[in-house]
Amino acid sequence: MPTPARSSNPFRVLARHRNYRIFWTGQTLSLVGSWMQTMAVGWLALQLSDSAFVVGLVASIGALPIVLFSMHAGAFVDHGDKLRIVRVTQSILLVQAAVLWLVTLTGHVSIPLLLVLAFVQGCSSAVEIPARHSMIIQLVGRADLQPAVALNSSGFNLARVIGPAIGGLVIARFGIAWCFGLNALSFVAVLWGLFRIDLPVVARPPGSPAAPAGLREIFQRSSAGAADGLRHLARPGPLRELLGLVTVGAVLGGPFLTLMPVIARDQLGLGAGGYGALLAVVGVGGLLGALLVAGPISHAPNKGRILMAASLAFPALLLGFAYTTTVGLAYVVLFATGVAMITFNALSNGLLQLLVEERYRGRLMAFYSLVFVGLSQALGSFTIGALARLISAPHAIACGALVLAAASITTVRRSDFWRRV
């Protein structure tokens, strides 16, 4: 394939690659529903419990399977049909959303049931996330990987804008259950897209079974593959250094979103619609950051320096948001927070995939999801929820921001990988 012409148009990969265009469109539509469900689950947990701790607990339980199983799932993905795996796991997520809609609509929802359904969602996501992310290079090729990853982030953040805004309206007009019902319906869009994608057959890596193995053999192979993947990712070099920075940022920074319903209600005096608007503002900023990475930044020679600038700006903005008491100022700070956060996330995702060997791509993405979804929610959300219970939500966010800022400054001073990527 000839090398694509350099362009600052962030949407060029959609025009160039049919499979990616179908994938991106379906995923973005489905993510609108997923963000509706995310904001609705947080609000429902707060309504049922009136506890910031329980809000954090629900988020952390959903991430627990990703912590426990994602590396095994990554090894399984590296030896399997990624497209088929994504189709199956997205179907399971559809069923989970439909059940959540039904029990909420009929008044049978409770915190224990919410925790069970969050755990089921986490089990499916542990496999789906590394399969979906590691499949992108098959859709666009290596030359267009960085802008495709960034555009994927733009779809995520576009959905973050639209989903919570619609969710707030749906809750006010029809009730919280219909956020879950519309999310279930939105999975039809992603499945429709996935079944229209046609990928060339990829040769199985050495050592993978030629036919489906028993569960015991699959687990043994996955365990060995997970251990091999961790050893590879732990080798000294730019890959390990960047993963270290990503881990600290995800665990200490990302969970501020978990306490957003508490800040919205108790500090800013907002209802469900206002909470959705705050999430949407973060999404608008994130959308801008992702489009910058997909466009002009994708050709910049100093991506590492941009990455580090974003890693320093993010905790500074979080610290400002923690003590904001006016809605207008909160919008401004959250917009800038979204730009910094997604610029860092999109750049780090693309750079990691370019640094890793192909045979470890699924395990890298599994570790990435373990950090960004698993540790961020299971450890970060649980900790920040417990801390909020002890010292208040604003102080909890500020503590995380201060530690993250110290870690970013230390990385700038002691590491030099960011000068070389």
Image (tube, rainbow, N blue to C red):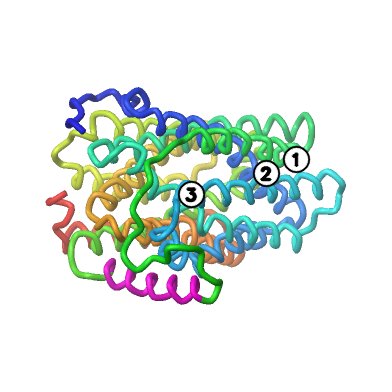
The image quadrant that residue 206 belongs to is bottom left
Give the numbered dot on residue 273: none
What residue would you read off at disc 1? 176
Q: Please tell me which residue lies in front, 387 or 154.
A: 154
Mark 2 residue element: helix
State the residue in front, 294 or 323.
294
Task: Please state the horizontal and vertical placement of residue 35, each as a whole percent of the image.
Answer: 58, 40
Pointer 2 local density, CA inside 10 Å: few below 14, some 14–19, many at least 20: many
The answer to which of marks 2 and 1 sits earlier in the sequence is: 2
Q: Residue at x 75, y 49 (%)?
A: 99
> Main structural element of the magenta stretch: helix, strand or loop?
helix
Q: Neighbour class for label 3 at 10 Å: few (<14), some, many (≥20)?
A: many
Mark 3 sits on what residue?
A: 322
Residue 390, above or below 170: below
Q: Spatial distance from mark 3 to mark 1, Cα to Cα? A: 27 Å
User: What's the residue at 17%, 31% (across, down)?
Assistant: 3
Q: Nearer the viewer, residue 19 or 26?
A: 19
Q: Are marks 3 and 2 in contact (CB under 8 Å)?
A: no
In this view, 42 is above or below 144: below
**Type of the residue with mark 1:** Ile
Q: Residue at x 51, y 69 (%)?
A: 213
Q: Report the amino acid beneath label 2.
A: Ala
Q: Residues within 10 Å of mark 1 (few under 14, many from 20)?
A: many
Quarter of the picture containing the N terminus is: top left
Q: Which residue is mark 2?
A: 40
Q: Position of residue 11 (x, y in %)?
A: 35, 25
Q: Is residue 54 left or right of residue 379?
A: right
- Marks 2/1 in contact by CB < 8 Å: the verdict is yes
Q: Secondary structure at mark 3?
A: helix
The residue segment tinted magenta is 217-233
Residue 38's spot in the image, x, y percent?
61, 46
Q: Secondary structure at mark 1?
A: loop
